[in-house]
Amino acid sequence: MTLTYREYLRLDGLLAQQQPKSNDHDEMLFIVIHQVYELWFKQCVHELRFLAAQMTAGDLPRALHTLKRVLTILKTMVAQLDILETMTPLSFLSFRDRLETASGFQSAQFREFEFLCGHKQESALQRFPLGTPDHARLQRAFREPTVFDAFLTMLPPRGFPTPAEIAGRDVTRSIEPCPALRPVLVRVYREDPLLAALCERLVDFDEGLQEWRYRHVKMVERTIGEKPGTGGSSGVEYLRGTLFRPLFPDLWAVRAML
């Protein structure tokens, strides 16, 4: 039998997953947007692992291409908030109680994405019961080197020694500023244009993720104001605390040295 479009994409199962719990017109939009976000998180995790493998292998051209794809996905994720913001606060309130304790705070895929980016928080593992697939996946990502760790492996083969302060660092910790790395990065910018281009694309990625966080905070703020979030979070107050935390602090700090 010839494979059809519907079968290849498993559309019967996919399109059966949107099941609103109220009769409110906008709940369908709320479900679809968040399901699409989970698909983009899945793709981003897939791309970041591929990116780390490419950088570890020293394949700069393919690493640049993969980062460009992730950046394009981030722009799409930001644009989707424009769609969600067509839903009014009153419309959301009409079905919010049906969410019970369900919250984006519980997105295991977004936590996995954060871990691979370099935001490591062991406390995030405790939100997912031990023995569940989500906990196992997050535990794996927590112990994995980050994208920036993969970037650091590219420096020595291209003639830029990695400072002892950051070489062999504990990969279960978030990326922290390393002043000793900055003179090395200055040399990269001045002596290796291709590697410098990768640095700039990492900064683009960092900025893109910060833009998505900011737009997400403002969307939540305009929808529920200062009300507590579902799922036990403090809502906007918690989200504000995630803003303006760079993934790669030394790539930002080096700008003052160039």
Image: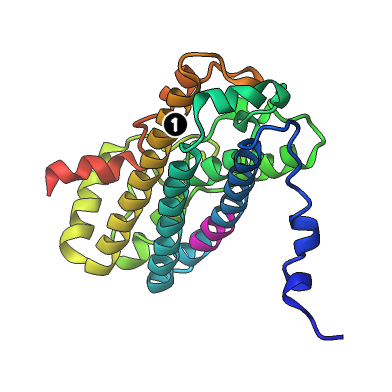
Foreground residue among 120 and 8: 8
Q: Is residue 131 left or right of residue 258?
A: right
Foreground residue among 241 and 135: 241
The answer to whether residue 138 of the structure is visible from this angle is yes
Amino acid bearing label 1:
Met
Q: Quadrant of residue 218?
A: top left
Q: Which residue is mark 1?
A: 219
Q: Position of residue 227 (x, y in %)?
A: 52, 14
The answer to whether residue 247 of the structure is visible from this angle is no
Measured along the vertical axis of the image, is residue 95 above or below residue 206? above
Magenta stretch contains residue 49: yes
Q: Is residue 36 left or right of residue 78?
A: right
Type of secondary structure dominating the magenta stretch? helix
- Colour scheme of the rendered structure: rainbow
Magenta span of residues: 45-51
Q: Residue at x 43, y 29 (%)?
A: 217
Q: Residue at x 39, y 61 (%)?
A: 154
Q: Residue at x 40, y 52 (%)?
A: 75
Foreground residue among 240 and 137: 240
Q: Residue at x 59, y 22 (%)?
A: 93
